[in-house]
Image: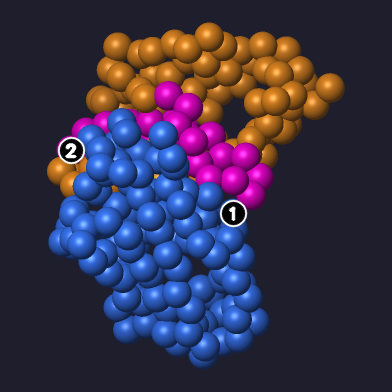
Chain colours: A blue, B orange
Amino acid sequence: EAGVAQSPRYKIIEKRQSVAFWCNPISGHATLYWYQQILGQGPKLLIQFQNNGVVDDSQLPKDRFSAERLKGVDSTLKIQPAKLEDSAVYLCASSLDGGYGYTFGSGTRLTVV
Amino acid sequence: RKEVEQDPGPFNVPEGATVAFNCTYSNSASQSFFWYRQDCRKEPKLLMSVYSSGNEDGRFTAQLNRASQYISLLIRDSKLSDSATYLCAVITNSGYALNFGKGTSLLVTP
């Protein structure tokens, strides 16, 4: 079974620039999550999709972050404009049956300079 | 107060030692509990689920205390390969999103 695919693996941008991350979940997984993991901290949920609808985006900084999941499969997360404090690893995860079936992608490491 | 709290460590232990990690959660309506392992620069991977009756997987034992709202992970006979960060995760709503603690760093030394 193919895992959760994310790209790019690494990205370095200057502050105030824009960046986008892509995630392809495991086939058949209806639920997709984006997490932000700052160095030394645990992953923090940014947004959760069920198919192509948003279940929870309460911790997404909506003034600069946006996410979409068209057709209920792939998802993109965008930051515009980026700030220094956005430097983190952005993890995508998908699940078939909630917490017992979570699979994480390998993440995108973002550095904002 | 954070929903899920862990002692960040680091825990430095010799090979063969027994080490225990605790995690507390603030929402009494929390439904499901997990321990994840995260190696340096890698994604989190599920180590084990935690049940009220406790569960064991080889050298690893997890316990849940709902009354006191904490979960624990015990690692017996530590191996060098156990060196990693251990993340406590809790599901507190019906949406099944995992809520993580900051993680506890473990270093097992020869």
* Left or right of B11 on screen, residue B73: left
Q: Disc 1: which chain? A: A
Question: At x 60% / y 81%, what residue is drawn?
Answer: A13
Where, by quadrant of the figure, is residue A20 drawn?
Answer: bottom left
Real-space CA distance between mark 1 and mark 2, rounded to the nearest whole angstrom: 27 Å
**In this view, B60 is above or below B68:** above
Which amino acid is tagged 2? Answer: Ala
Where, by quadrant of the figure, is residue A75 drawn?
Answer: bottom left
* Left or right of B82 on screen, residue A33: left
Mark 1, other Cα within 10 Å: few <14 / some 14–19 / many ≥20: few
Q: Position of residue B92 (x, y in %)?
A: 23, 43
Q: Can you tell which of label 1 and label 2 is closer to the viewer?
A: 1
Range of residues picked out in magenta:
B22-48
Question: At x 51% / y 82%, what residue is drawn?
Answer: A83
Residue A40, numbered circle:
1
Question: At x 49% / y 23%, what residue is drawn?
Answer: B73
**In this view, A103 is above or below B22:** below
Q: Is residue B37 visible from the viewing direction of this image?
A: yes
Task: Quickly name the residue at label 2.
Answer: B29
Residue B7, numbered circle:
none
